[in-house]
Amino acid sequence: MSLADDLWALLPAYHRRRDAETGGVLRALVEVLGEQAGAIHDDISGLYDDWFIETCADWVVPYLAELTGALPPAGGGPAPDAAGAARLAAVAPVRRLVADAIRFRRRKGSFAIVAPLAQAVTGWPAAAVEFGRHVAASADLRAGRTQGGMAGLRRPPVPGTSDAFARVADMRAADAPRSPGRYGPDNLGVLLFTPTLLGVAEGTAFCVDEEGSTLFQCDPLGADLPLYHRGLAPDGLPGPITRRLLGERRGAADWAIDPRLYGPAGCIRIAVQAARDHPFEAIGPERIVPADLAGWRDRPPPGKVALDPERGRIGFPQRGAPYRVRVSYLQALPGPVGGGTAPRRVAEAEGEVIAVAGSAVGEAHGSLRAALAEWRRRDLAAAVIEFRDSLTYDEDGLLIDLGGPPRRLLLRAAPGTRPVIRLANAEAGAIDVWRVQGDGAAGGALVLEGLTVAGRGIALVEYGGSLEIRHCTLLPGWLPAGERVRRVPGGAPSLAFHACSGPVTIAASVLGPIFVRADEHAEEPLGLALHDTILDAAEGDEACIAHDAVPFVALTLRNCTVFGGLSAHAVGLAENSIFTGPLRIARRSAGCLRFCAVPPGSRTPHRFACVPRGGAAEPVPAVFESRGFGTPGYAVLAATCPEAILHGAEDRGEMGAWHDLFRPQRLARLRAALDEYLPAGLSAGIICTR
């Protein structure tokens, strides 16, 4: 019974009967009063819940943090707006820090509080190490312990800095701004694991045909991929799995494999299919041999499987090679950009759902081509094609025809999956690109979400509807190059627009160049909006290109990293972005660039607070940890990057695609917290590990 019913029952029966006879005006008034009384009741109940950090509303958390003094200042820059504060709270939750404020303060000044405090402030896995215990010194019999230790050659080295080896004393302070020290008697180290660990379940392994049909890569694109564990090192931090960490040799061909790293409950699992139509069988730990497969020279003995976790390589004996291999593993990426298993907001499906799965169980289709044929056969106005596993799908000649009445089609990966669509060169005389065509009329919508497309690009021809790409990786013309996947100069573009007019939105994705061929006599240019995206062109190539002139496209960029040059008709707004190549914008009288890194000699509209400052001729190049796609430091600004770029965004954060990770703000909060909680007389250095 609602509150309005309770109020209505309090009225005399005579008035209720008369109101029913006269049209129910009094009842309608009571309904309004009951609705407002219910709102007041909920607000009063919420006021009680807001007294406690565990039950309060999200907007109350900053007030409780300020009241308790639990939140250290971010330092340096202006406070983020409401949307920015929500994104910062998503990566570095404040609620937990406020809840543990009293517990932390009771242990203030102790070494044991450093690691939990660092993890609560930054949201990253953290560990602490006392560097003073690793300094070589003369043994004191009265101290009860010795300094340092002997280097055991048979003992596997421990990743990070928490080993037992003795070092020469370093008298520099660990928190020195220019040249910090490490192994000093008064130094502490705070280790932070900043990448995001993502798990891939039963992904398709890449067969290295050039080296033989018995060799495979865990990465579906064929690049080297270091495999990670969740925190099995002595310091408790996640990290890469080394060959010595994977197993210990017991005999000539006998290895003791750590079940926490490989096996049914481990981080790595391998399953093989002996022949077509045969079931997949898991490889047991007793068959695994840790091996160095650099150059693919080390082959396993019969009945064994060689595994190189440092490169993600698998080798089988010459006899008994499998038909297919599926592998489950953990990989480290900078953040949730591009196709992968990172958590993402999945909108409610609009229309019929057509499932795609490699096993084709039940109503699921075994390929994207079959799912598109089902969509065309049923002529659905709104449909969702969902991939439900992390396999590689070899497709060719894909066609999506969105002409005629407006229709909406969503192609997405199910949560927790990472499907790879490889557009193969099946026929020498046929078009192999993924083609999307329309009749030029406005209306309709195509959405791609969570997909990885390799081999060929996507071509849109006379398409007048909207295109939205979210959390996708489009890698046409990219080839494995040892430790990374690189793009071939002059290769095929990721997206090609031919006489298209609909708006295009690209969010949290990784793409190669974009080709635009549009009619310059059209009323409006093609609208292209990108945010939290990486445009990666090869050296000397442009990220946005046209056939014979400046692309007739109007760009909007926010938090983007562009490797290579960029040409466009106009830029409405570009902010917090990095451009490594020159910009050529035809229309300079409109638009603005805010808080961007722009190379000298670029032709742009008005700039505000861009780097270099004041249009200086001296370049301020951005320094990245890695340019290799798929590596933990891909497109991440290095610590040696100029300060104007590392803290040059609007909120004093870093420019580029990883702006919303808020690394500078989280590190600044940690430094402020360490000043309050650190043991007296000690200095702490922050070390970001990968």
Image (cartoon, grey):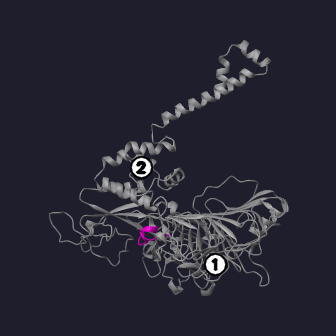
Can you give x and y, in whole percent of width and height, for residue 106 in the image?
31, 46
Residue 391 visible here: no
Q: Quadrant of the N terminus?
A: top right
| Element on which disc 1 rests | loop
Q: Closest to the observer: 470 or 618?
A: 618
Residue ID for mark 1: 322
Residue 406 visible here: yes
| Element on which disc 2 rests | helix
The amino acid at mark 1 is Pro
User: Which callout, 1 or 2, points at the residue further toward the start of the chain?
Assistant: 2
Q: Residues within 10 Å of mark 2 (few under 14, many from 20)?
A: many
Can you give x and y, in whole percent of width and height, for residue 385 in the image?
73, 61
**Is label 1 or label 2 in front?**
2
Q: Residues within 10 Å of mark 1 (few under 14, many from 20)?
A: some
Can you give x and y, in whole percent of width and height, for residue 360 in the image?
73, 65
Residue ID for mark 2: 97
Q: CA distance from mark 1 to mark 2?
A: 51 Å
Can you give x and y, in whole percent of width and height, for residue 653 in the image?
46, 61
Q: Quadrant of the C terminus?
A: bottom left
The amino acid at mark 2 is Leu
Q: Residue at x 42, y 68 (%)?
A: 643
Magenta region, residue range: 636-645
Tell whether position 643 is magenta.
yes
Q: Residue at x 34, y 49 (%)?
A: 104
Q: Is residue 349 left or right of residue 294?
A: right
